[in-house]
Amino acid sequence: MGKKGFPIIVQKYGGSSVADPDKLRRVARRIIETKERGNRIVVVVSAMGDTTDRLLKLARDVVKEPTARELDMLLSVGERISMTLLSMCLNEMGHPAKSFTGSQSGIITDTNHANARIVEVKPKRILEALDSGLIVIVAGYQGVSIENEVTTLGRGGSDTTAVALAAATGAEYLEICSDVDGVLSADPRIVAEAEKIETLSFEEMQEMAEAGAKVLNSAAVEYAKRAGIKIHSVSTFGPGAGTVVGDFFENSKTGMVRSVVSESEIVFVSAKDDFSLPEINKIIDFFDRERIAYKQFTLSAARGGRFDFSLILPLENLHGFEGVKIRLAENYRGRLLFAEGWGALSLIGEGINNDGKNMKTALSILTNAGIPVHDIHTSRFRISVLVDRDKLPDAVKTCHREFIEKKG
């Protein structure tokens, strides 16, 4: 008998949750428990453990700069391994399951390799499988482009897959399952005193993700906000209630720092001398042509109608930075500076720049701790400070102690 009419639940399991056969079997039992409560289940899986990093290293051991298309073909394999093994587990346990790749799931993306965006989801095959009583296992992080090429969605893209499928299937509930019980106030590998945050607004969570927090993907949060889907970030194997990310606004918390986030793999690019506007436009065109995402682009007027500029390149989804740097250096000989030894520290919270208190405090405590500040950017939800990369852990601990631990 089919299961049409039963609520659909989407669960996403990160790489650490499916890192080995024992964990795969434990995940399978958790899925079965959810199904036996009267639900239809769609499961999205990441690659096992550090599979993606190992595949990326393998590619670079073979060639200096892999082409984006072939790299996507290679990296998409990791999630396919996870999906088939988990499906095998479930079938052996007596609960019929069927695995689907991103393309088989109907996830259509743009043509941007390594950091594609979902443009449409056609879940026909998934819904048919659910209606026939099957548990559906989907390979996260991947889709098929409008030109029928395999694409990947960038680091953390399995979150985006899960949100997109939850929206497309009309899911009642979405769980993002990892080895951490919810969203914490800092990376627990840096700050042992990091605290769980019970609820976060979409905006706060997206700022955290943009600033380097690994627990949820920025594009996934943006997608969830548009679709009106609450995200429950929970521990795969723990008993905690986790964190709920949704359309929350807590007036009592306005102006408070909710989390301290860091990002070490960045490059700060700036102008060594003045650039004309046509030259600035050519640089922007270069990044667009190369499909390179950048952030915090700053342009300021200099002398005689010329301009200074700076931007930050996140390296997480930029798999060929050395080649990019060489091409830029050749085109603008001696005119660009690349600061490769910096990291970004960000304070996140609704309205934390309503006045200058938080920024003044951050600058004061970092300076007193002997941590030089190289650059600073602010928004309604964020204060981002660039510091030396080797000082970044100390900067995170210092700010967490001042803004979160001391505030109780």
Image (spheres, rainbow, N blue to C red):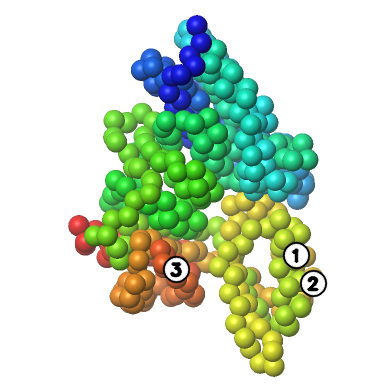
Q: Amino acid at mark 2?
A: Asn
Direction front: furthest residue? 5
| Residue indicated by mark 2 | 331
Could you tell me which residue is drawn at 47 percent across and 72 percent down? 377
Residue closest to the eye, 298 or 22: 298
Label 1 near label 2: C-beta < 8 Å? Answer: yes
> Which numbered dot is residue 379?
3
Could you tell me which residue is drawn at 50 percent across and 6 percent down? 1
Residue closest to the eye, 280 or 174: 174
Q: Amino acid at mark 1?
A: Phe
Q: Position of residue 23 (x, y in %)?
A: 44, 24
Give the secondary structure at mark 1: helix
Q: Earlier in the sequence, mark 2 or mark 3?
A: 2
Res 408 quadrant in image = bottom left
Give the Cα distance between marks 2 and 3: 33 Å
Label 3 near label 1: C-beta < 8 Å? Answer: no
> Which numbered dot is residue 286?
1
Q: Amino acid at mark 3?
A: Ser
Label 3: how many residues lie within 10 Å, few (<14), some (14-19) or many (20+)?
some
Q: Position of residue 147 (x, y in %)?
A: 78, 40
Could you tell me which residue is drawn at 44 percent across and 27 percent down? 9
Residue closest to the eye, 187 or 86: 86
Q: Position of residue 101 (x, y in %)?
A: 64, 28
Visible in this render: residue 353? yes
